[in-house]
Structures are given as C-alpha cells and as structure tokens.
Amino acid sequence: MSDAPKLPGSLRQNPRLDDWIRIDAADTITIRTGKVELGQGILTALVSIAAEELDVAPGRIRVESADSARAPNEFMTVGSMSIEQSGSALRQAAADARRRLLLRAADKLGLDADALSVEDGIVRTAAGAEVSYWELAGGRPFEAEVSAEASPKAASAHRLIGARAQRIDLPAKVFGQARFVQDLCFEDMLHARVVRPPTRDAKLVRCDASSVETMAGVVAVVRDGNFLAVVAEREHQASAAAERLREHSGFEREQPLGQESGLHQRLTENLKGSYPLVDGVPTEQPVPPLVAPESALHTLRASYTRPYLMHGSIGPSAAVARCDVGDDGDGGERVTIWSSTQGPSMLAPSIALVLQLEPQRVRVIHVEGPGCYGHNGSDDAALDAALCARALPGRHVRLIWSRQDEHAHEPYGPAMRIDMQASLDTQGRIVAWNHDVYSTSHIGRAMPFGNRSSLLAAQEKAEAMRRPSPRPALAPQAGLHRNADPYYDFDGVRVVKHLSLEAPLRASSLRSLGANGNVFAAESMLDELAAAADIDPVQLRLRHLKDPRAKAVIEACIERAGAHPGRGDDPQRPRGRGFAFSRYENYKCYAAVLVELEVDLASHNIHLLRAVIAADAGQIIDPDGLENQLEGGFIQAASWALKEQVRFDDTGIQSLDWESYPILRFDEVPPVVTVLLDQPDEPSVGAGEGTSGPTPAAIANAVFDATGVRLRDTPFSPARLRAALFDDAPA
C-alpha cells in the first residue's frame, strides 16, 4: 500500500491540472468547476479559494461552471458537498499551479523558489526583479496532473478565506442582465411549449394538430407517442398555440392517483423491504423487535409525518436546445442543451440514452435558473427542448414550462412517516431509542444506466422507456434514512429504514432528503421526553452529547438567544420558545435553531417572531455565503412546516398555483440572527441543508411551549392547530 498523500475532493476523478486552472493571456486566470450556482454562492467561494492560493486579486479570476464537454466531472451539485468536493480540489490545484509557476520563476530569475514572493500574480525577488504569471505561462497549458505534494496555505496566512466576499453573480441579477436560462436569446431562436398529459400514466388518444397549424407564428407540432409540443416564432404564440392544442387533444387515464387521505398509513403497507441500520448503514438483516426496557421510568410513542412537498421554484423550468446534423462530416446528430440542471455531466449521457445517441454527441451547459435545491423540473425541460430541437435541426429552441406544468409535473419531495418510541430512566438517561422511518425512494434523478429513465418525456415517447424500479440505498446517510441514526449518545438504539412501494405521485430529491423529516421527529421526541420527565430540553440534549463542537454550537445558540421572553401579555396570543439541533449527515455542519413564536388562538395561525441559528461548518470560506445558506434553509424549512402540502385526489394534482400551494411570504419571515463558530484548522463541510431538519422541530417545540399541545404532522396549519387545541388529535 502506498503512503503517498491522496488527492482531495474531486481531484481523485479529475486529476488533470488544466481541467481546473488556466492562466489566460490577458492578465486573468480562469478556474473551472463541475459544480453549479444555484444561488448558494459556490462560485464566489471558489473564487476566494483560488485567489487565496494563487496570490492574485479576486477580480482577476474568471469562472467557467459546469459544462459536460469542458468542466471536470463532479457528478452533481447535491448533498451540501460543493465546498467539500470542488473547494478542496480547487484549493489543491491552485496550490500546485502556484508551485509550478514559482519553479518556472525561480529558473528564470536565478533564485530558489523559497526566496520569491508573489503579489497579485507578480513574482518578485528581494532585489526587485519580477516576472508575472502570464509571462511564465506563455499561454500554454500545464499539461500535468495535480500533485498531492503541493501544500496549500496554512489558515494563519489567509487573507481572503474567512473574509466577506462580494458575490460575483449578483451584479447581473441586480441590474437585470441576462443571467438565467429563461433569459437566453439567440438570433434564430424559436419558442416551444409542451402539452403534458394531466398525470404521468395518462395516454394521448386524440390530437388535432390542424387546430393550431394555421395560427400565427406556429412552426411545428411535435408529437412522439404521448409527448406533444408546439413550436412557434414568438413565445406568446407558442403559449397560445399550446393552450388551443390542449383543448383539441384528449387524454385517458389508465388509473386514478388515489385519495390523499390515508397516505401515511399506506406508506407502512406494501413495503419493498425493511432495513435495520447497523453503525449507520442499512442492512438486509432481520428487523429487531420493538422493546421498552422494564427499568424505564417513561416510555413514549408517537408518529410524525410530512406530506409531499414541492421544490416551489419561483420561475418555471426552462431550457434551450439546438440539434445540428452532419457538422462533423459523418452525418450524425449533435445536440447542445443549455439547462439549469444540477448535474450536466449526468444529464448529458442520460438524454443521449433517450435519444439513442452516443454520449459524446450530447452536450449540456449549465446556465443559472430560479433555484430549486433538489431535483425539480429542469432536467425534464431539457429533454423536452431537445426533442423539439431535434424536429427542427439548425435552430435554437427555447422551451419554458407553464406554472401549471411546474406545479403538476415536477418530482416532489416524498411524503414521510416516522414512528418513534423512546425510554428514559430514573437518572434522566435515554435507555432505548427506536426510530422507524417509512417513505418512498428519495433518489429519482436521471442516470445514464440501463434501459430505463426517470425523465418524463422518455416515458411519454412512442418507444417509451420504463421508470426505474425503486431500490433501497444501502449507503450511510443516503435517501430516506438520512439523519435517522442519532448523533447523540443513546443506549439501546434501534433504527429501521422501511422502503415503501406506495408512490401515487412522482417524487425525487428535495433539499436534505430524509433529514428534514427524521430530525423533525427525533428532535420533537426529545422535547416530549424532557416534558414528561420535567427536564430542561436543552440540558437533556447536552447530557447525551460527547462531541465538544456540538455542545459549543448549542451553547452559543442559547447564549445568543438570551432569557426566555415569557408567554406574553395577551392570553389570546401566547408566546413560546423551541429549540432543536442536528449535525447534518452526522459528519457535516452542526446547526442549532431556536425559534420564538406567537400563537393566535382566535385564528389559530402561528406567527414567527424571531430565530437564532448557531452553526459550525469547519473552516469558513465566506461568512456571508454561509449565513445565507443557513438562513435560507431555515426560511424554506419554516415554509414547509407552516404552509406547504401537495394536494391531490383521483382526478389529479390540485396544487397548481401559489394560491393552492402557498409558501411563506416576505412579511411572515422573522428576524434571524446567525452565530458562526469558525474552525480554521478543520475541513470545510457542507452547510446548505444544515437547518432544514432542526427548523420544523424548533417550531413544533415552540408551539408546545406556548400552548401545551404537540403538533406532529406538517404543515402546522390552522386546522391542525385547532384540532390539537380542542381535540388533542391531528386533523
């Protein structure tokens, strides 16, 4: 076994230095990443990392984001892993590039590299002789693999890392410049709209294309089996034609969706399998029995649920595609797609599989979209656009979903049910902890494997591809069991993952995957145990934690929050405080969330008054970016907890707009205070999903503190709160 140091992050799969860094001819440096900007600030953070290691001003750095034909293949931008994977890789690559340039400078200047200094890309000797990176590079690539021997700077030498950086993506957005995929404009561009079946199993049995062919601007009606779209010269023409074509088309459903009522009970039935976790890893062993220790003073049982959730992208999914035939001399097709996908290097071969093309003949270029933090409709829109462009070679085709398309057809975050049973002894120690989580698969992205596809149009084409069969993810912290294994030091831990086959709605990855439901349930149960034993809920957590960093985060949150504000002066609007904690995936960001809220007993509405977040994500790259991620995660999870629920019945999806699927509004967002605990000597870890789990638990715990009733089913709607207050049972 070799003792040579290993390359960090994504360098293991992408070791070529030129894949990461290019010294340009015009006094700038281009860095590449396979990760994409979703609004999380990753590109800004990578600029700080590269500028720090290269000793250049951040303004000299240019960024090329994910492109399946040019960027390093970093799989997908998922799991809060961008800094961990791309950041660590780029840091090592930049350190190695600097080392190589200094060696060239040393040879040119006749001194050892250790005798040279660098300032903004200018290498100098003590006597004042100098040479620039750009002279040393001479416009040539490095033509080398990144060396693991290069030493990145020590934290004590950092000037940029840890400092607040100016977001590189914001100026264009603030000044209304073309930044998003919806803004792309090409000289010859056509516009398309898809006429989607009302449900994924519905069949197109009638289509009168002649009803739109004479409409102004209509160029083509594209039909392939159940896939139906219209292409026009102008966007408004495509939209109008699609509406008319829908009116002149007929669909038949093979089977109804089913009723929303009883959804969570059905998750416990018709299981594909149950997998006990051993050291955090799901296994195919027998499920241990559920037992309460005889010595327990308190044993509590409760079930917690969440519904199907939307990604709720403010702008509907879109893509631009172009198909060229014969440009390479062999008459073959090449398809280029501009998409806001989270994984161009995965989407390109997945679409090639559907189009029956060789993988290298499809190129996907990332362009920012409205954001999603999960698998929304952007990948589907990319294939839709490609099918339309293929029907009209040589023309760019921009396809935008309607709001109704987005709400009805995006892959939702799966519904979940978590059954908890926990026991506390006379010493206030948890002596049994049982966590059974039931859900369908949380992983449904398009993958270029086999002869199946999760893309909508792939299943609609005449030569339809079957949907992938759900398979249990047996890796640690994957899918529906993410954060089910407790980070606390409990005795008698029993955690079981139950994969359900009951899937009336299409579902896939949503921010934090199973962690949102699992942490909500676990942190609520901890509060229920504390209340039953009359123990301070924060102290109950602290006594079961060994990790000093976890304790420090909890203590920082409580200290910043200050004294409990009390119930308030108005008995009809009692106030409460709730707390929750988790370490995302048990190895990434530590996050503690405290919420203060008010309950209106007349309207049964919950009003958030204040939130305090404390977090430790290792070494901080950009404090602004980290705060934005934590606070944005809190706001989104609060919206899930208070408002969001996909409604459906036998006829289809009923949540088709922002009235039927409400989200948290600006005036409902409370002031948020965030405390960051920097660990400059620790690796940077993902934080984008750190607050997604603790937030609903903190809100539920605060409602209990205010009213004495326990809410276990999200969303915490007025109807549910009213039922809990008067019936002590969920609505």
Image (tube, rainbow, N blue to C red):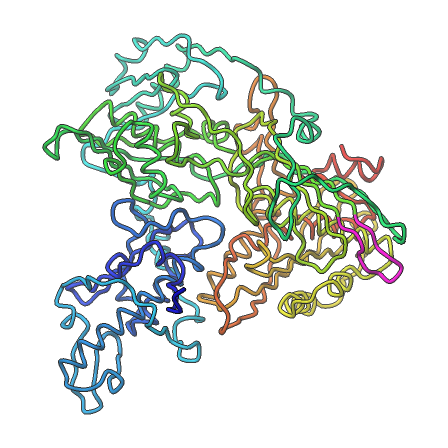
Is 568 located above or below residue 383 in the figure?
A: below
What percent of the width, then of the height, locates residue 284?
62, 40
Q: Nearer the viewer, residue 100 or 402?
A: 100
Residue occupying the point 39% across, 18% down: 243
**627 with respect to 322 (left or right):** right
Report the number of numbered marks.
0
What percent of the width, then of the height, locates residue 138?
12, 67
**Residue 555 covered by magenta stretch:** no
Q: Nearer the viewer, residue 322 or 363?
A: 363
**Residue 431 covered by magenta stretch:** yes
Answer with the quarter of the image where residue 647 lies: top right
Is 198 located above or below residue 564 in the figure?
A: above
Q: Nearer the viewer, residue 21 or 228?
A: 21
Q: Please provide the residue range marked out in magenta.
A: 422-433
State the residue lying farthest toward the front: 1
**20 with respect to 302 (left or right):** left
What percent of the width, then of the height, locates residue 442?
54, 38
What percent of the width, then of the height, locates residue 724?
80, 38
